[in-house]
Image (cartoon, grey):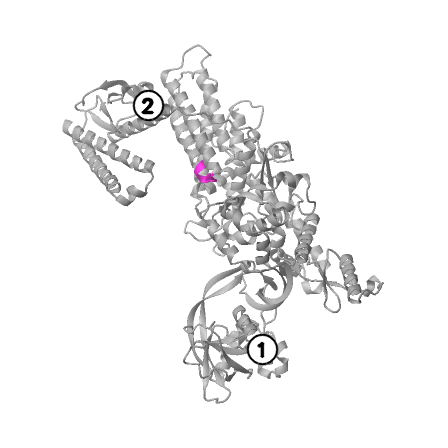
Amino acid sequence: MELSKNYIPNEIETKWYEHWLAKGYFNSVPDEREPYTIVIPPPNVTGVLHMGHCLNNSIQDILIRNARMQGKNACWVPGTDHASIATEAKVVGMLRERGIAKSSISREEFLKYAWEWKEKYGGIILQQLKKLGCSLDWNRTSFTMDDDYYKSVIKVFIDLHEKGIIYRGLRMVNWDPVGKTALSDEEVIFKDIDSKLYYVKYLLVDDSSKSMMVATTRPETILGDVAICVHPNDDRYKAWIGKEVIVPIINRKIPIIADEYVDIEFGTGALKITPAHDKNDNELGKKHNLKALNTLDVEGKFTAEELSEENPSALVLSYNGVDRFALRKKIVEDINALGQIEKIEDYKGQVGTSERTGAVIESRLSLQWFMNMKEFLNRNPETLSAVMNDEIKFHPEKTKNTYSHWLNNIKDWCISRQLWWGQQIPAWYDEDGNCYVAANKEEAIAKAKAERQKAEAGKTLSPTVSTFNLTQDEDCLDTWFSSWLWPMEVFKGISHPGNKDVEYYYPSTTLVTGQDIIFFWVARMIMAGYEYKHDLPFKDVYFTGMVRDKLGRKMSKQLGNSPDLLELIDKYGADAVRFGIMFSSPAGNDLMFDESSLEQGRNFNNKLWNALKLVKLWEGRQSEVGSRESGVEETFAVNWFDNRLNEVKAEVEELMKQFRLSEALKVIYSLIWDDFCSWYLEWIKPGFEQPIDASVYKKTVEYFDELLQLLHPFMPFITEEIYHLLKEQNDDLCVKQQSTAGSPQSTVLTQGKLLKEVITAIRDARNKNQFKPKDEIILHLQTDDPEMYQSIISILAKQVNAKQIHIVSEAIANTIVVAVEKDRFYIESERQLDSTVLKTDLLKDLEHQKNFLQSVVKKLSNERFVQNAKPEVIALEQKKQADAEARIKTIEESLANL
């Protein structure tokens, strides 16, 4: 079979993925083996693959494939999140295109359309993960709105309500006027903005010639003002406390109150209090028994509904239905017309925005469902201690501090959302507003009956079902209230507790996720795990960094700097894309994505492919077994690579344990590109038209096989393809068990390192002196340890085209001198050497070595460095000093010989 010039990934990737699926390699069932379990962070059902998904899922696939090849029962569970806000927005958009308004249809009709949309588009991202090569157990695909999953969420809500953790109350919430729903604090993203500070005069009731100046960034909420607050120690306003001023336009009389909350330095030191539109104002309102007047509706438009008792003027009523930002401009104009705007200043401020819609958040008084998180944390203190004590290990470790800070300052979680797509809150209300939390209407009616009988002091009542006109709460639960159960419920641990799967796979082994959802998801999963399984949900958490462009900017559609991942896969192949993203991904830190890293991945593919072609070329040119003995160079080359392979296998194993995956890939890359392709294959390459020793060829194929095993988790497609082209195989690389690392011999590794350094140095000297490749040299070696060269001297001669190599004890005149550590090499040639050029090069090298020595000596003279550095680091610097001094001495002697 003739191999193509370069590796062509597209057809090969499809072929092998279908083969793996057909063989069932990704499927897992409980057995006697050690489980290695990962549950995918469920992407939004609305999502498509982007660079963040590529990084996150490449890491998961590397870990799961590595575990599979270690003989563990690898189970990687796929699935999607129903994403209430995002999906509802998509469905509303679809209905709009069909000329249907959400308000014109019932909840049941809307949900039919939502499921229609989900079935059509919801599986796109999972199919795209197949293109990336992700080895997920597709038989276990979960969805947070599946019937069992839905029931488990309802079950947990009821349980926590009965435990007093979940409650309903009128509180200030973060309100998204575009999504028309409440949000938790974690779903609010704060952004810096250029704003304005408006200085407004509130006229004194007793004397309209006097006024109190208030600086505000939100004049659109002035009609909801109920007080002005000053600091009790502010001398400017002590005489004003207890008096009243008039709110512009609405002409409401409001008191001037005192509270230490006020910042004397901000604005004028006087703060307008609007309890219905600011969380801090609301707290002050409660403290001072102030009324809350809501002047904005659910869409962020003005409403005079709560102002009716004040008989609002025609001007006030004209604001009805005006959007808050247009209202700001209009109210400022109208107050200015009254002569009560003193000045307007530019102001740098911050606003909270919705993570999903991007809308500016409003603080709004709303009747919502909450979780008492402090109480829940008190029930499950392991949520914090397990992480801080490394029972659950965070990678990188620095994320523990962020996690601890959030838990120690935790606030109640608003879990209700004013949406239809999601788990509908299992709360039922009678005509008097009494609430009954139950799994279904029948259970709610039973609870209502029981409470009615109790209220009637034991009287026997037999009301018919129709007597209880119960209606279910319209709201649904926060999507995170379902996904926090993910590690358990993907194995039916809540809906069918104690089943075989959850007992085997839970807790999972590793979670791979982004640092941005450490609060949304990670902390809450840990809480849920201890509450419902009395155990941690996972043992290790690997936090990925954020993928940024090469300018350091976050990738986004708005900036147009987020490449189409599928286009990249089509252009470079999945292996090259995986290589590119992993090669530039330091553990836990943000990575700067540059498409050139994908080109490097494609070049690596072609390097492997060319190595395969060279080895296959030798396949038909083997000497018969026993027809000739292997040369000294072949014996050393085989021995050296065997030891180098064992060294790298041990190093990679340790790096994988530490989740330093990018470093592991770089070590494997260097082993293959440099040690195997550039050195080993060159050292064993037979002469022109000469056969390769059969035993050497066999060992070479074995080594190639082992290199493919090491690389497979990172680049699964090309490694599987080459594995089968290399020789006839009885198994697939995907499930091949990795061989264990032997103990490398340090002497052989030292000889190999020395050989590479000498060859490189002599080749550099040849190139500098414009030797042609065919020009033969005689090499004179001056060394204190000639035995070190005994087994490598024949390879050295072959690689530098030396017809003779002599061991000498003194310098050789009229030669090119090369120094490698303490050894000196004198290159003798039939060519006439230009002593002027040689002298110039030596002087340049001498200056470089002296500067280098000076920097090392300076470091070793630094007391702080010597005191704080590890012994091995100091030893390395001391070796650098000794080597530099030896090279300087060699160069100076060489100059003297010219």
In this rendering, position of residue 699 left or right of residue 142: left
Location of mark 2 (residue): 799
Q: Answer whether residue 52 is visible to the viewer in this image.
A: no
Left or right placement of residue 438 versus residue 745 in this view: right
Q: Which mark is residue 319?
A: 1
**Any magenta on residue 254?**
no
> Which residue, as the protein is rendered here, is positioned at the far top?
627
Q: Is residue 564 left or right of residue 831?
A: right
10 Å crowding of disc 2: few (<14), some (14-19), many (20+): some
Query: Is 756 located above or below residue 59 in the figure?
Result: above
Q: Secondary structure at mark 2?
A: helix
Q: Label for residue 385?
A: none
Amino acid beneath label 2:
Gln
Residue 465: x %, y % from top left: 82, 62
Mark 1 secondary-structure assignment: loop
Residues drawn in magenta: 658-664
Quadrant hosting residue 135: top right
Query: 507 and 144: which one is in front?
Result: 507
Q: Residue 237 location, x and y as percent?
A: 44, 81
Q: What residue type is disc 1 on?
A: Tyr
Figure label count:
2
